[in-house]
Image (cartoon, helix red, strand yellow):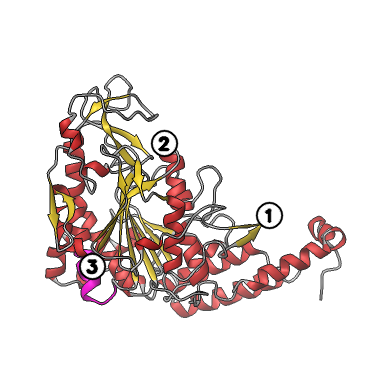
Amino acid sequence: MTHPFFTRREMLTRCGMGLGSLALTHMLGAANFTNPQAPKAPPLPAKAKRVIHLFMNGGPSHVDTFDPKPSLQKYAGKAIPITLKTERRTGAAFPSPFEFKKYGQSGTEISEIFAPLGEHADDMCVIRSMMSDIPNHEPSLMMMNCGEVRQVRPSFGSWITYGLGSENQNLPGFIVLCPDGLPTQGTQNWRSAFLPGAFQGTQINTRETEIDKLIENIQNHYSTRQEQRRQLDLLGELNKKYQENRQEDALLESRVQSFELAFRMQMEADDTFDLSKEPESAHKAYGTGFQGRQMMIARRLLERGVRFVQVWHGQGQPWDSHDDIKTNHGKLAAECAQPIAALLRDLKQRGLLDDTLVIWGGEFGRTPTVELPDVGANSGMSNGRDHNPYGFSMWVAGGGFKRGYVHGATDEFGFAAAENKVHVHDLHATLLHQLGFDHEKFTYRYAGRDFRLTDVHGNLVKELLA
């Protein structure tokens, strides 16, 4: 029996917004509320099925990693003939303290601090002409993760799980491995925003090693699984009755789905995150540090059908080397280079690399000029670099991208993209294409307009594709 009284919201909905409610009901009904993360086929032929995004938080220096610039040595200590506005004051040319070496048949040049990746040079597509918009962390993080520098928008991982669902219904489709708390901008880096809440990233603090600390409340010590199932079924019935007069409330549905997923995770999370089941040879290959654990967990998640895994390197901005770049970048690369190489080797040996997109990079690069010590961001030393959105490097492996290929170039000194420029919007458009989506048609209607990851920008970079 329908309750004889209306709430204020129900009266306004029925009397003043009837047509709008019908449209909203149809729109929400189009979403698969019964199982929002059920696997879906993309609308176009796809080369990739899953994504792992290795996020080097803080902005690694391209001229010290994947973009060698001999001219910096020639101009060492001198002004360079390129002047661009930076966030802080910089001075003369600052040569890289690291040596570069050519690797593989492709001859891709890689810094000594990432030497373990040399064995994969012929699998990597290095983009040396990346560009973003703003030289601060907050908007640049939002651009790289969400395609927008100002407004909170759905993250790349949320878009992918919205479009493709997940192949494993007992784990979240979008998992974020982020140690030691939240990065700058916090959960906005992986939130679903106006997409249904089921597509938001689930953060796991991989600094922890025990399953109960990795995922809080993963084990129920008070009820049997059968009792939990009966409780959820009852809760589902109550929520269904509540929703009958409320046009399928999306927020309530997201909460219901989170309860269901939490229940199902108890069946698989223990096994997935239990690295003691890995052979000793795997632990040796990945290394004993937390980055090794992260990469091993990431590979296990991909094997089990998780659609999108984002692996963060550190809390705050660890790659933000405003000073002492030799020590800081050297230490950071030592933490992750071997584990990343082991991950690529594992994916390749297990036949997963061909249809997995492996993305490496940060939110921007760093200046080829030295940051001056009177600006407050460093420790009074003249041996670091400021933020640089004008030109930087990223690389992609697998997923139908060219192998052993270097795309584009920065200028002679590495200050700005100069040849075959690739904006973040262009990268997103190209990644979506490899996953089976036309970035201009992959939209979600919200607040009266169609939104997309690339907003009103972005071009497919065909030269990157095999």
- Tell whether label 3 touches label 1 (CB within 8 Å): no
| Residue identified by numbered label 3 | 275
**Picture coordinates of residue 8, whole percent (x, y):** 82, 55
| Amino acid type shown at disc 2 | Asn
The answer to whether residue 207 is left or right of residue 461 is left
Residue 82 location (% of width, % of height) = 32, 30
N-terminal label among 1 and 3: 3
Neighbor class of circle 1 (other Cα within 10 Å; few <14, some 14-19, many 20+) is: few
Q: Is residue 56 visible?
A: no
Q: Main secondary structure of the magenta part?
A: helix
Q: Residue furthest bottom?
A: 226
4 vs 86, nearest the viewer: 86
Q: Is residue 349 magenta?
A: yes
Q: Tell me the mark number nearer the camera, choosing from 2 and 3.
A: 2
Question: Would residue 300 be found to the left or right of residue 10 on screen?
Answer: left
Q: Amino acid at mark 3?
A: Leu
Highlighted magenta segment, given as a residue range: 342-352
Q: For the residues marked 1 and 3, what is the alpha-carbon distance in whole angstroms? A: 45 Å
- Marks 1 and 2 sit apart, C-alpha to C-alpha, by 29 Å
Q: Residue at x 34, y 75 (%)?
A: 304
Image position, residue 171 (x, y; %): 41, 70
Element on which disc 3 rests:
helix
| Residue at the disc numbered 2 | 136
Residue at numbered disc 1: 447
